[in-house]
Image (cartoon, rainbow, N blue to C red):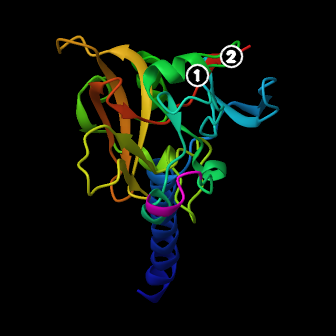
Amino acid sequence: MKKYQSMVLPLLAWVLLLTVAACDKDDEEVMGKIAPSASGTFVDERDGHEYRWVRYGSLDWMADNFSYDLKNEQRCLVYLNAEDYEYNRASTKNLAKYGRLYDLPGALESCPEGWRVPTDADWQNLECCLGMSPDEAAKMDWRGNIAHRMFSLEDDPCDLNLRLGGYWTTNINMSRSPYRMMGLFGYYWSSSLDEQKEGMYYLYRKFAYNRNEVCRQSIESEKVKLYVRYVRDAH
């Protein structure tokens, strides 16, 4: 009996070790990063600003929010905190981290040569590269379980580094700032019309600090200013 136990106990320990290792590997695949196949930098010749990019699938995605200044407040703005909105509307302290907010015409106008505003199909392909199923990617509102692979908090960087920089809206009253939700939500343009709605509603992506889903929704293009991440064909 003792001889039998001396053989079985090490065997059970080995099986348990393999099981734990397999679970750890599964956890890594579910929660871990999916690294890009290539990365690099791009310099906008118009102002000398350098942007990082990462490659997923057949596209290079900028890994920094764009910040080219059109010098037209109707088209682009730097997010203002409440105090700056009240007392210092020339502040650019959020520019380095979050880039500029654009309406869609401004995002299209700001695009550097060789790049473009991503289509909704581009966003869906990216989401699939990062673990979302095609069926999920085609749905509206909150879907998938991959946002942690796309947006970055201060202590949790990722390769795409999407930022929760809020948005700007025309829907205000005299007592409220048009700048909303910095640190809580991030909003990013696509160039695709929402074919399920009448009018000029364009699809966008929204990320929340406390959710692992990605929201796919649409809005009238000139009523808000959102952030933009340009893409180009990999070469």
Q: Earlier in the sequence, mark 2 or mark 1?
A: 1
Depicted 103 relative to depicted 206: above or below: above
Label 1: few (<14), some (14–19) or many (≥20) C-alpha neighbours in 10 Å: some
Characterize the magenta stretch by its predominant secondary structure: loop
Residue 186 position within the rendered picture, expressed as x and y whole percent measured from the top left: 42, 46
Magenta span contains residue 140:
no
Q: What residue did someone put label 2 on?
A: 234
Callouts 2 and 1 close, C-beta under 8 Å: yes
Depicted 109 relative to depicted 65: above or below: above
Label 2: few (<14), some (14–19) or many (≥20) C-alpha neighbours in 10 Å: few
Front in this rendered view, residue 227 or 35: 227
Front in this rendered view, residue 185 or 80: 80
Q: What residue did someone put label 1 on?
A: 57
Which element carries disc 1, helix, strand or loop?
loop
Residue 193 position within the rendered picture, expressed as x and y whole percent measured from the top left: 32, 13
Disc 2 residue type? Ala
Which element carries disc 2, helix, strand or loop?
loop
Residue 31 has which mark?
none
The residue stretch that appears in magenta: 86-90
Give the left or right position of residue 91, taking residue 18 as reference.
Answer: right
